[in-house]
Amino acid sequence: MTYRRLRCNGGQISVRLGTDAQLFAADQVVTATVHGQEVGSIRIPPAEQVTLGVPLEPNAAHRCEVTFTSRTVRVPARIQPGSTDRRRLAAHFYTFDFSGRS
């Protein structure tokens, strides 16, 4: 997943994350990358929510981008009997709270 902010001078985002306990029996790990560098990582226990703070640094076009990756994805149809859901699912991204620099 990529978070992109236009006309950005930098700052930080706080991201509220969670997982689906019916799909993930163990902690889920989400990593944040900015300009190809890992800037944060967090473990999400099943059925809990956590917050990850990520620094934002603008590129030459004054855009801030953060790429989030999950170590594990699950397909409900492969795990839950009777499910026809073939989507590849990972963490839930509930909120993004931005605080920026002027």
Image (cartoon, rainbow, N blue to C red):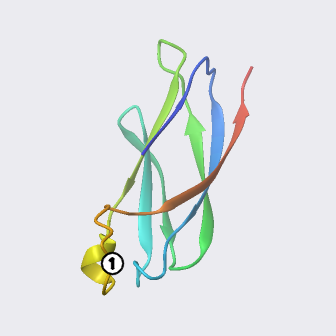
Q: Dividing the picture into quarters, in which one does residue 62 lie? A: top right
Say whether residue 39 is left or right of residue 74: right
Give the image location of residue 65, x and y in percent.
48, 32
Classify mark 1: residues with Cα within 10 Å, few (<14), some (14-19) or many (20+): few
How many numbered dots are placed on residues in this image?
1
Residue sitting at 33 percent across and 63 percent down? 71
Residue 86: image location, x then y, percent = 28, 65
Depth check: 36 or 15 in front?
A: 15
Nearer-the-camera pick, 75 or 24: 75
- Image quadrant where residue 10 sits: top right
Q: Is residue 93 above or below residue 84?
A: above
Q: Which residue is mark 1?
A: 83
Element marked by disc 1: loop
* 36 left or right, relative to 58: left
Instruction: In the rendered view, tell whether residue 61 sits above or below residue 81.
Output: above
Find residue 84 and report its horizontal and vertical position in percent.
30, 72
Tell me residue 17's x, y (percent): 57, 61
For this view, does 39 lie left or right of residue 71?
right
Question: Does residue 25 lie above or below 85 as drawn?
Answer: below
Q: Is residue 37 above or below residue 90?
A: above
Amino acid residing under circle 1:
Ser
The structure residue drawn at horizontal position 59% and vertical position 76%, both measured from the top left corner, is: 48
